[in-house]
């Protein structure tokens, strides 16, 4: 079994929240290997990738298999999000330089979720859209699923900066777009959203949040927090010690974080190329059901 060992704090969290223990990891990984590796000619799925899907489904193997099947159909079902993801592409390079989706380096505690800064504000006065932001977000999320145990075991929390966001961007936030985002994030990538903090809230945000809530459980609806330009309330949940200085924090600056994630995504160019090949090779087994699973929060 070639997977990372968890820290003691994360191991305990995994046992309590996602039904993971030393007894079931290898058994469930073996089931996933037998189900999927036979479907590829030149592509072998990493155990760590299998484990990310198992964790997102609380080690429900059948549910994990269905979600991984959906993942390998994303290039065809959501090409605007998942096709043409070469990090050296001119458009991808421009998007990475904007620093749109930036996971923070530190977590609040050893067993806390990963906090991700989503800078919707960077789309203002640019030629890019919410679809482009979503594409970069999913490219980054895949790296987190591979490399970040806090992300796979505990989940993520979002800090969304909406500074100067106006109608031209808010009008893109349609039920259709949000539905497709949630379908990909929850039904194919096992991203577990824990909370959402919206800062620099613009006028007209109420309608956008109402659309977002259509796809949330009652539990997660209570975990949406909205702030204007005063972040003091947010610091109770997302402390200054993990935030960049531009947001009142002490953990480096936005440019360094942007440069880090640009280089990180560039270093995974082979991963995105392999995804393309695997999607072309993959055939969904005839006997496997493909029912959509509901959004869950733990």
Image (cartoon, grey):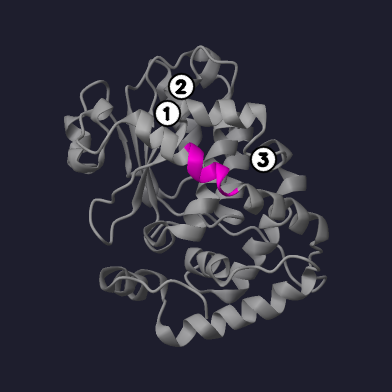
Residue 249, how many percent across, how many down?
21, 34
The residue stretch that appears in magenta: 262-268
Residue 35, how many percent across, how many down?
71, 76
Image point (48%, 67%), residue name: 55
Marks 2 and 1: in contact by CB < 8 Å? yes
Splitting the image into 4 quarters, where does residue 29 fall? bottom right
Image point (45%, 54%), residue name: 192
Which quadrant is home to the C terminus? Answer: bottom left
Lateral position of residue 102 relative to residue 133, left or right: left
User: Within the magenta stretch, is there residue 264?
Assistant: yes
Reading the image, the residue beneath label 2 is: 122
Splitting the image into 4 quarters, where does residue 115 fall? top left
* Neighbourhood count class around disc 3 (C-alpha, 10 Å): few under 14, some 14–19, many 20 upward: many
Q: Nearer the viewer, residue 212 or 12?
A: 12
Reading the image, the residue beneath label 3 is: 85
Image point (48%, 36%), residue name: 212
Reading the image, the residue beneath label 1 is: 119
Q: CA distance from mark 1 to mark 2?
A: 6 Å
Asked if residue 174 can be seen in this view, the reply is no
Q: Secondary structure at mark 1?
A: loop
Splitting the image into 4 quarters, where does residue 176 fall? top right
Residue 290, how many percent across, how many down?
71, 63
Asked if residue 247 can be seen in this view, the reply is yes
Marks 2 and 3: in contact by CB < 8 Å? no
- Please tell me whether residue 297 is drawn above or below residue 78 in the rendered image: below
Q: Secondary structure at mark 2?
A: helix
- Please tell me whether residue 144 is drawn above or below residue 42 in the rendered image: above
Query: Which of the two discs, 3 and 1, labels the residue nearer the N terminus?
Result: 3
């Amino acid at each position: 079994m070639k997977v990372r060992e968890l820290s003691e704090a994360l191991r305990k969290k995994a046992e309590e929240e996602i039904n993971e223990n030393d007894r079931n990891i290898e058994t469930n990984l073996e089931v996933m290997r037998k189900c999927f590796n036979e479907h590829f000619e030149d592509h072998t799925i990493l155990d760590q990738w299998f484990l990310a899907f198992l964790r997102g489904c609380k080690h429900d193997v059948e549910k994990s298999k269905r979600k991984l099947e959906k993942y390998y159909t994303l290039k065809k079902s959501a090409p605007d999000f998942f096709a043409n993801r070469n990090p050296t592409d001119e458009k991808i390079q421009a998007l990475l330089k904007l620093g749109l989706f930036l996971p923070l380096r530190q977590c609040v505690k050893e067993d806390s979720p990963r906090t991700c800064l989503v800078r919707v504000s960077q789309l203002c006065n640019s030629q890019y859209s919410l679809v482009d932001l979503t594409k970069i977000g999913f490219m980054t999320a895949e790296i987190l699923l591979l490399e970040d145990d806090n992300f796979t075991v505990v989940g993520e929390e979002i800090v969304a900066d909406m500074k100067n966001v106006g109608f031209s961007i808010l009008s893109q936030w349609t039920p259709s777009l949000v539905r497709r985002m949630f379908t990909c994030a929850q039904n194919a990538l096992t991203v577990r959203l824990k909370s959402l903090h919206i800062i620099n809230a613009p006028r007209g945000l109420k309608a956008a949040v109402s659309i977002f809530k259509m796809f949330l459980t009652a539990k997660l609806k209570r975990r949406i927090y909205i702030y204007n330009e005063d972040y003091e309330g947010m610091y109770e949940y997302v402390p200054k010690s993990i935030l960049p200085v531009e947001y009142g924090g002490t953990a480096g600056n936005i440019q360094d974080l942007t440069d880090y994630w640009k280089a990180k995504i560039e270093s995974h160019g082979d991963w995105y190329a392999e995804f393309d090949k695997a999607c072309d090779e993959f055939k969904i087994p005839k006997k496997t059901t493909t029912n959509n699973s509901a959004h869950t929060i733990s």
